[in-house]
Amino acid sequence: MTAAGSSSPAPSPGKWSVEELATLAAIAETFVRGAATRRANMASAALDLAADREQVAQLRLVLRLLERPIVNMALGAGPRRFRDLSPAARERYLLTWSTSRFAQRRSAYQALRKLLCFLAYADPGEGGVTNPHWARMGYRPDVAPLTSRPTPIRPLGLPANGELSLEADVVVVGSGAGAGVVARELSGAGRSVLVLEAGAFVPEPEMPTDELAAFDQLYLDHGLASTWDGSVSILAGAGVGGGTTINWMTCLAAPPAVRREWAQEHGLAGFDGAEGDADYAAIKGELGVTAAPAMPAKDAALIAGARVLGIEAALTERNAAGCTSCGSCPFGCRAGTKRSGLQAHLADATLRGARLVAGARVDRVLVEGRRTVGVEATVSVGAVDGAPAASRRLTVRARQVVLAAGALRSPAILIRSGLSHPATGRNLRLQPVPLVAGRFGEPIEMWSGVMQAARSTEYVDGGPGRNGYVIESAPGHPGLIALAFSWEGADAHAYLMDQIGSFAPLIAITRDGGEGRVSLARSGSVRVDYRLDPSGVATLRHAIGQMARMSRAAGAREIVAMGTPPAWHGRQASGPGGEERAFGVYLDRLGSFDFSPNRGAVFSAHQMGTVRLGADPRLHPCDPGGRVRSGTSEAVIGGLYVADASLFPTAIGANPMLTVMALARRVARTVAAESPGS
């Protein structure tokens, strides 16, 4: 395990000072009591490993300023250092930052809160002692049995010395949903295919069994990915199989209205008709999509609430065969029952002759005379018996390159290659997700069983002034719960977490109102900026209102919409109609809920739209076949394509995996129809 998940990571010499770590430990103790020094060390190591250097420097400056009495006096905390404040005064200090009118203070608060609360509950413990929080919240990890059908994928071994170079007909950059489909289709067509994945290859029998290790090994930026201001927490896969390895397996096609819009307004001929239907059907067959085999309590609450309200709800369709219902889908599937890339498209591609290099980060595409000739990558080789791997340059010569590194990385590769269209990196859609949870009178244990077994598509088509969305049940393990649920003080948060086994969360996958941008920071890392527009805010507000109604109809005793501060409703109102009136007031409050940055809680597991395909060369960096344009004309860069969620002309307001794969089939046909040498 890397430093982010090791048992006792030490600060790097010359970086974090003893004073900075002491302040970080004091903040950790303020959020969640216990093991504060351990968490401070873990947090500093994680930030050094995964965060942008400029942001880490700013955060460390904040820690130093907290210990300056004159600064704290100006902020109303009195002329004292933060570490000298009483526990209650520290809480008041942090809560003041959480609702500050200054966006930078809210950003700093949320960055520290999310990371330190996550570590407090995701940490499995050390020295054979299990995290004591787990027993209090009733969390009992259910480790899945090992697979009896391991993936056939075996990454290439590269020499530790000498020049590193390879050749192929086609290089596929990335190994997620779109990459796997393209690799399968082109290797089946007889092409020599080489897949380059920046993340690690983790065989299913070696998949993590705890949340901290899973985020460290299988998630983008070791689980620390977010927008630049920290207002949207981003979950994305970063290993062989990409998001297919760690997702919750919900399989939904793009709504019919979206398919029509893409065909009619963006020039994707056939996507709304028989061609698109055939692609979706083929993908569902290859994934073995079927209805959820069981109905956990959190999903039963969704169905029950929908029935009372008279709105549509049904079992979720998923890409799993013989699922053990262990609840560890976001840790990778040790049982091998998830039809991820490791068991489906990448596995098929391997059996058809495709090769894979793991730990290979593609830096740029090589172009000569407006024709792709390969890629350059940085690859880690030579790690033996605990010795660190060396970074080496890998050159791959290929006449066709398919970028499928995801909507946050594919545009960055194009920008580094000097191939950026004016729209490259723009039009980022995150499908922002709000969170509402109901507390029930019986055990829910959201972490147990099928991760998502129920959903409602009642509001997928949107309405006046707002966009569409899908309501889904939301599982969670201790760290993610502690990160996602609001903090109102150490005692309040501890009590909430101790009662968390009776909460059933709901989320809404919303179709964006607003957009963002992917660019390169001064350090060279990827920067993500994002803002909602009025229709996006209206969509989130409508969604939390409907989820609150659903929770209440299902019998929830308390309801909370997550934010800073959160919005609570309880059934304690007395007298005839008292609770009914109180709930009406609550819905009015949700109708004006503050979703400005770092106020309303917003998450994203779906990123898309940064290298859109379409007919208009001024607006779409890719043509309708997935070819990368060389500018704002119809001319394309020979042999260069995109085949991931970057291509989406718009958000879809539903889980995107099937649509990514359907578009990847479309792009694979384009690639196959063009000779590697043409």
Image (spheres, rainbow, N blue to C red):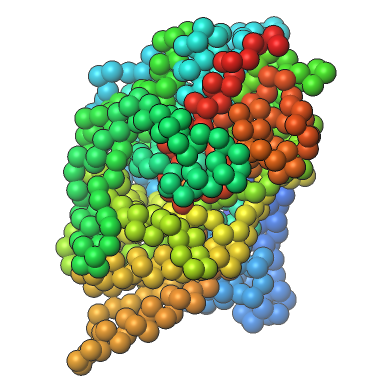
Q: Nearer the viewer, residue 108 or 540?
A: 540
Q: Residue furthest left?
A: 442
| Percent position of residue 153, x then y | 42, 16
Which residue occupies the extreme bottom position in the image? 575
Q: Residue at left 31%, top 70%?
A: 549
How far across and how far down the image is residue 656, in percent? 46, 42
Question: Residue 426: where, in percent of width, then height?
Answer: 68, 47
Name which residue lies at 46% across and 30% down.
275
Q: Is residue 488 above or below residue 119?
A: below
Quarter assignment of residue 35: bottom left
> Is 605 located above or below residue 382 in the figure?
below
Q: Residue at x 45, y 61 (%)?
A: 462
- Residue 217: where, in percent of width, then height? 47, 34
User: Which of the 4 image quarters holds residue 276?
Assistant: top left
Q: Is residue 441 left or right of residue 58?
A: left
Q: Nearer the viewer, residue 40 or 340?
A: 340
Q: Residue at x 43, y 72 (%)?
A: 566
Q: Is residue 279 left or right of residue 136?
A: right
Q: Nearer the viewer, residue 554 or 457?
A: 457
